């Protein structure tokens, strides 16, 4: 529908004004960390392991629980129940290890009642200040809140520009792949995996501008707020034929107000590339008032490559989940990552740990 000229002019002025308003700077300048692999191999979870009749695998997001266990959401397998597994492992100088030798890593399955692979595609997970689960699904996209018993408590409002439509919103399964709650519980971050249809064409040989969506805590819930642009790296020399993909697979909110971003790439014939970037939001433009980024002027967030698994001489599987881990005896921080094996026989659900030194 064509807007009247006056309304269109006002909408344009509003969009330009929003584009000029920068988000508030981070509380602290981003300190570039030094990351190194803990141990020589990942902790592999048996791909045919089952808990309560549900197959363990497809681990797409992970978060530490207050009792020292870990909660990992499953990227749904067909029409099987949507679920979160409770994992038991420890992180030390030798990397992640099973807590109890001879016992399975996955101990409990939390079924997310009313959801399965037809209406839900679990990707990111966080623990709300209430102790409930916050889980993102990439296909709608959505963020829902569940009790630890798996009962639906509520759903966060999603700005309409993310909703899939004709020429607008997310493309395919490229919605809310990530989810992370800030350590102070005041901000919840998510993002689309690749550019929205109205923001940029899906050209793999060019950077893809995605929107980092920040929810602000308000009372017992969250409201959608700032949107910042993050540019996913292009695929170097994308092949003319064969499957290839690169996207923003996970975000991790850091104590200093900055973010860690996980970019995941797969190119048929080349394999997997997993890279971590430190993200500074200081000075980035709030684009929440822009229905489209095409032709708009804005300042994206700044990103710095801090870890490349290929350069480290380690070839991980399809890593999609990222969380802060426990501190080691020397006081250094750790990161814990999990991989989504896609329930394929030639892949493995893995838990990997990195040491973080500043």
Image (cartoon, rainbow, N blue to C red):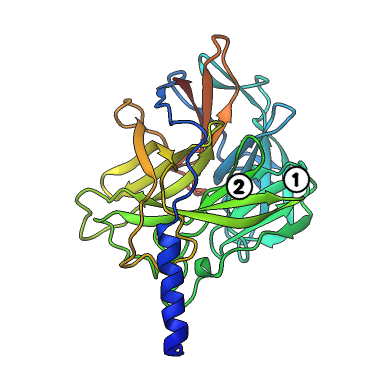
Q: Which residue is mark 2?
A: 188
Q: Nearer the viewer, mark 1 or mark 2?
A: 2
The front one of 342 and 290 is: 290
* For residue 147, above or below residue 103: below
Q: Position of residue 153 (x, y in %)?
A: 78, 56
Q: Position of residue 313 (x, y in %)?
A: 31, 26
The front one of 322 and 52 is: 322
Question: In the rendered structure, are the residues bearing label 1 and label 2 in contact, judged by CB atoms less than 8 Å apart?
Answer: no
Tag on residue 132? 1
Q: In the image, is 50 to the left or to the right of 203?
A: right
* For residue 24, above or below residue 63: below
Q: CA distance from mark 1 to mark 2?
A: 14 Å
* For residue 37, above or below residue 21: above
Classed neighbour count for the residue bearing mark 2: other residues with Cα under 10 Å, few (<14), some (14–19), many (≥20): many
Q: Position of residue 1 (x, y in %)?
A: 46, 90
In the rendered image, the residue lying farthest to the top is 330
The front one of 320 and 88 is: 320
Residue 262 in view, yes or no: yes
Residue 156, quarter of picture: bottom right
Image point 39% across, 60% down: which residue?
Answer: 195
């Amino acid at each position: 529908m064509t807007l009247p000229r006056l309304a269109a002019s006002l909408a344009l002025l509003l969009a330009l004004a929003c584009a000029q308003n920068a988000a508030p700077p981070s509380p602290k300048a981003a300190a570039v960390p030094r990351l190194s692999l803990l141990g020589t191999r990942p902790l592999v979870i048996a791909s045919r392991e089952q808990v309560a009749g549900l197959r363990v695998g497809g681990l797409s997001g992970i978060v530490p629980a207050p009792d020292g266990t870990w909660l990992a959401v499953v990227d749904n397998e067909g029409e099987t129940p949507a679920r979160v597994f409770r994992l038991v492992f420890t992180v030390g100088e030798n990397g992640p290890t099973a807590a109890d030798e001879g016992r399975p890593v996955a101990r409990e399955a939390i079924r997310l009642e009313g959801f399965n692979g037809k209406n839900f595609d679990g990707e990111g997970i966080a623990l709300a200040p209430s102790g409930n689960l916050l889980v993102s699904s990439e296909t709608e996209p959505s963020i829902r809140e569940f009790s630890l018993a798996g009962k639906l408590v509520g759903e966060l409002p999603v700005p309409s520009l993310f909703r899939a439509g004709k020429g607008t919103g997310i493309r395919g399964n490229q919605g809310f792949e990530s989810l992370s709650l800030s350590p102070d519980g005041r901000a919840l971050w998510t993002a689309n995996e690749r550019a929205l249809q109205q923001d940029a064409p899906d050209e793999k040989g060019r950077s893809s501008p995605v929107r980092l969506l920040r929810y602000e805590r308000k009372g017992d819930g969250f409201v959608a707020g700032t949107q910042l642009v993050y540019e996913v790296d292009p695929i170097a020399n994308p092949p003319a034929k064969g499957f290839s993909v690169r996207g923003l697979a996970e975000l991790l909110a850091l104590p200093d107000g900055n973010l860690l971003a996980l970019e995941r790439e797969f190119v048929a014939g080349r394999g997997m590339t997993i890279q971590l970037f430190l993200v500074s939001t200081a000075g980035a433009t709030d684009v929440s008032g822009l229905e489209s980024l095409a032709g708009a002027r804005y300042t994206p967030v700044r990103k710095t490559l801090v870890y490349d698994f290929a350069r480290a001489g380690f070839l991980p599987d399809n890593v999609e989940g990222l969380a802060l881990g426990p501190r080691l005896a020397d006081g250094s921080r750790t990161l814990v990552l999990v991989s989504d094996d896609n329930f394929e026989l030639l892949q493995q659900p893995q838990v990997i740990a990195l040491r973080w030194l500043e």
